[in-house]
Amino acid sequence: MRALCASLTLLILPCACAQTRYRGPRLLAGAGAVLAGGGSVAFSTGDTRNEPALEEAGALSLALGLSALFAAGIWAAARASCEVDSDCAENEACQRLYTTAGPYGQCIAR
């Protein structure tokens, strides 16, 4: 139980240091990484011991973890996008890039 509490504390603590708009995506990515890591261990253990239930649970956990990581990346990219300088934090400016896919704005440090 102690190890679980310590792991959760270490997972949540760095989220407090992230910029306000990135705390949610960072927490989701951390949870996804834990799920993916635990799922891969469970899957390999189930495969080695020939336990189909553990193998299926590990595969499901791995899939959910990777999905959470993917969603966190999209969420963070959406949070970093901007149209004008007022969309960014005080110490950032909106940099507009014109690509073949269309205009894109990203907050960068001043």
Image (cartoon, rainbow, N blue to C red):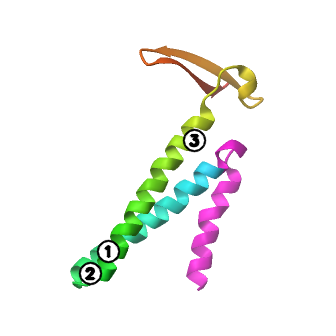
The residue singled out by tag 3 in the image is 76
Label whose residue precedes the other's in the sequence (2 or 3) = 2
13 or 94, which lies in front?
94
Helix, strand or loop: magenta stretch: helix
Q: In this view, does 60 lie above or below 71?
A: below
Please state the horizontal and vertical placement of residue 94, each as a whole percent of the image: 65, 21
Q: Pointer 1: what residue?
A: 56
Q: Quadrant of residue 85?
A: top right
Under tag 1, what secondary structure? helix
Q: Indicate which disc residue 52 carries.
A: 2
Tell me if residue 5 is in the magenta stretch.
yes
Q: Identify the residue at image location x=60%, y=71%.
A: 8
Q: What is the crowding at mark 1: few (fewer than 14 residues within 10 Å), some, or many (at least 20)?
A: some
- Dot 1 and dot 2 residues touching (CB under 8 Å): yes
First to last magenta residue range = 1-23
**Identity, as a three-letter code, of the amino acid under mark 1:** Glu
Q: From where the camera sits, is residue 101 visible? A: yes
Tell me the amino acid under the disc marked 2: Pro
Tell me which corner region of the image, top left, top right, bottom left or bottom right, holds residue 96. top right
Above/below status of 89 relative to 71 = above
Mark 1 vs mark 3, foreground winner is: 1
Q: Residue 96 carries which label?
A: none
Is 18 left, or right, of 66 in this rendering?
A: right
Amino acid type shown at disc 3: Ala
The x and y percentages for residue 54 are 33, 80
Select label 2 or label 3 by which is in front. 2
